[in-house]
Structure formats: C-alpha cells, structure tokens
Image: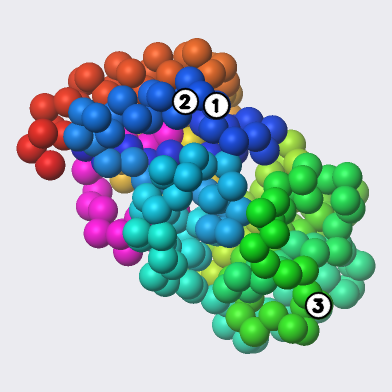
Amino acid sequence: MKFVFDLDGTICFKGQPLSEGVTNALEACIENGHEIIFASARPIRDLLPVLPETMRKFSMVGGNGAFVARNGEIIEVTAFEAKIVEEIQNIISAFGLPYLIDGDWDYAYTGSETHPIYQNLDPLKLAKNVSLQELKDIVKVVLFPGEQRNEIVGELKKLPISLYEHTSENIVDMSPSGIDKWNGLTKLGIAEGEFIAFGNDTNDASMFAKAKESVCVGEHKVRELASLQVPSEETAIIKMLSVLNEKYKEEAVID
C-alpha cells in the first residue's frame, strides 16, 4: 500500500523535523513493504529539511501539487501563466501586501521575520531570497492579508487559480489553476483508491477524496471528507499509523 503524508500539523509540528517516534513508525511501514510519499504545501526545497536523510529521495509532491519529485530529482514544475502573475501582482500592489513567492527554486520574501512561515523558509540555505522581478517562473504564492483578508480573498477568487485559506496563520496560499495535491500524486502514477492519506487542512481535501482511506489529524473541517480522525497528538498519530500498517500488510506484499 502507498501511504501519503502531509507534513506540517500532520506528522511534524511547529516546523520541527519528524520526531524519532514518527520516523520509527514510518520505517515500520517500509519494513512491511509499504511505500511512503510526502505531499506538502512546502516547495521541495523546504520539505527536505524536516525529513531524515534516509527519506529525502522518496517520492514527493510540493507546493500543493506544483512540484513533483522522484528519487531525489524534481521531475515536474507547474508555473502560473504570465497574465495571472500580473493580476496577482496588481492585487499585491493595490493592498500593499507582504508575500512569499516561490520560483522553481529561489524565492522572494517580504513578510515579517517573526512570522512562523519565515522560520521554516529555506533552513538549509539551498536557495536565494531574490527580488520578485528576478524570479523567472512563479510557481507558488503566499500572501499575508492582515485585516483586509475578506476583501483580498474576494479579489483573488475572481482569478483562475487554486486558492487555500489558512486562518490559523492568517495567510492565503495560491497555486496555478487545477493544481492540487491529488493532481501531483497522479503525476507520480498513483491511482484513485490505491493509497492512504494523512492530512490536517483544506489543501488535503483533494487527496482525501481519492484515497482508499483518509486520516484527518485534529479538528479541521476537512475531517468531514476523511474516513478516520485522530487527535493532533503524536501518540495517537503513531497508533493509527501502526494499525493501518498492519491492516494493509497483505496489500503491501502484493504491491
């Protein structure tokens, strides 16, 4: 069986690397013949630092589907069309918004250095923080709307983009139209009903809808789409993973 994991708030917390307990639980799945895949809002660049070195070449979906990696290599990147980038820039200018904008590897960041997202930004110093004009392709956009959230989201919803609101962090996250985690998984050859998904937020909904079983971590509204739910506690997550590891052991052997 294939197990697909979101990272932040699902199996790692507060930007910290996977704990020893979670890592051991994943390794137990691998020993039983299961395949581990990671699917995160983070670009691949920022996904790597929270993983053990032994797992950094696993198949991955980053940027909510905009980046796809296999065997340690990014095999596909989906960028915004130039016209959409221009319209997003117009909204940024009109509202004076800080942002984190990812290119195919480098990024442009103008937000606060105290925001949690900054703490998780390129900790391995693999890329450069450049001006927006220096980014050749725009792959992912995060805006910090402040108190103007409703008005800004209203303007963004007029655009043909994939839009996610994360109220706990007060950010708005955008990917190119039609790009989501499920779209990214299909590019890895994963079929509907052939995987188990773990997630905790709106951007996990697309893969929950296509999974054989889906596990919502915590109390987010996306639990309505999940077949299973666990508290946002490491011991509960590890226990659920152990149960599913054994439940699908025979299917892992077949795979």
Residue indicated by mark 1: 19
Which sits in the foreground, 251 or 177? 251
Q: Considering the numbered disc 3 on the image, is that residue within a helix, a strand or a loop? A: loop
Q: Is residue 72 magenta?
A: no
Q: Position of residue 162 (x, y in %)?
A: 56, 62
Q: Is 189 above or below relative to 4?
A: below
Q: Picture coordinates of residue 53 (x, y %)?
A: 47, 45
Tag of residue 22: 2
Where is residue 109 drawn, in percent x and y?
A: 80, 64
**Residue kind at label 2, given as amino acid type:** Val
The residue type indicated by label 3 comes to Ser
Q: Seen in the image, is 189 located left or right of residue 132?
A: left
Q: Secondary structure at mark 1?
A: loop
Q: Are marks 2 and 1 in contact (CB under 8 Å)?
A: yes
User: Label 1 is placed on what type of residue?
Assistant: Ser
Would you say residue 66 is visible in this rendering? yes
Q: Is residue 190 magenta?
A: yes
Q: Which residue was labeled with disc 3?
A: 131
How far, Cα to Cα, is label 1 from label 3?
35 Å
CA gap between label 2 and label 1 equals 5 Å
- Occupied quadrant, residue 128: bottom right
Vertical order, 140 against 252 (above or below)? below
Q: Residues within 10 Å of mark 1 (few under 14, many from 20)?
A: some
Q: Residue at x 54, y 32 (%)?
A: 18
Total marks shown come to 3
Please report the residue visible at 45 percent of the width from the left and 50 percent of the height from the top: 56
Task: Provide the secondary structure element on which disc 2 rests.
Answer: helix
Q: Which mark is residue 136?
A: none
Magenta region, residue range: 181-198
**Residue 163 higher or lower than 84, as above or below:** above
